[in-house]
Amino acid sequence: MKKTLYTLCAATMVASFALVPEAKAQVEEFDATPILEVGEEQPFKYFSATGKISNISEKEAGNFATIDSEENPFGFYFNEETLILDNSGKITELKEGLTITALIDGSKPMLMIYPPQYSPDVVIVQTGNPGTVQLDQFDSNYLNKVQDLIIRLDDQSEIVNLSGRELTKEEIVEKEVLIFYDIVLESYPAQTGPSKVIVLERDEEIPVVELTDIEKAYQIAENDHYVVNGVKMIPLRLVAEQLGYQVDSTGIGAFVHKGAVSFTIT
């Protein structure tokens, strides 16, 4: 399963990457380029950028982390929607001095400036805790694209998307995913049971349409009515108050009024 690790530039599109604890890594230290597992090239829309945070500041668009490097400096914005995890899959916080890998959606618009500035969906913090993170894609047999890893998923496997919604294992098929694991069975293909799988997709947000008072009144009438002898009966008080009228009961009917306008209903 283990392969030689190479360092590639921050904008390289790759099939997968792996993060391992520093004590177990095959390289002595991280630099400001992503550490990637070499495999068959895939047209993934996500790419990774790795480096050590030198500064965190506040800007109008959110918090901004600066990655200093003579070779590949970059920066990235993050906010409450950014998923920040350590290499074991636990939620954590960003601090200056931490080594991170940012997962960036290459299909999103980006500022054409140097050094580049990104808005990653996920940031992985490298720690000494056991755990490997891998960006990959799996078929219906849960075999990855380079055919060197099979994942075994069960009821204990946490499977979510970027919005935090729980998914079934069938919903990861042919999707770009992050898998978190720490034990690999020696076989070919290798096998592992990920503790966490994140599908790199968000739920589509349904736009909230603000209805006018009249539209809301029509909506109330349509959703709450019944018909008597061909006549639609609607809730008078709910509809009238939605339109700004006051409704007073007369015992045999109602008095509906708003300013100088009034109606007596029997």
Image (cartoon, helix red, strand yellow):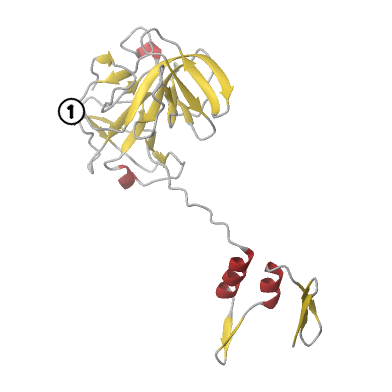
Q: Residue at x 43, y 46 (%)?
A: 203
* Image location (x, y in percent) of residue 243: 68, 69
Residue 125: x percent and y percent? 45, 21
User: What secondary structure is marked by label 1?
Assistant: loop
Q: Residue at x 21, y 33 (%)?
A: 145
Quarter of the rendering occupied by the N terminus? top left
Find disc 1 in the rendering and name its residue: 188
Instruction: Give the quarter of the image for residue 190.
Output: top left
Q: Position of residue 171 (x, y in %)?
A: 33, 46
Asked if 230 appears above or below 146 in the picture, the reply is: below
* Residue located at (66% from left, 77% from top): 235
Q: Considering only vertical position in the picture, is 105 above or below 173?
A: above
Of 98 and 118, which appears nearest the observer?
Answer: 118
Q: Residue furthest bottom?
A: 229
The answer to whether any part of residue 125 appears in the image is yes
In the picture, measured across the screen, residue 235 lies left or right of residue 14, that is: right
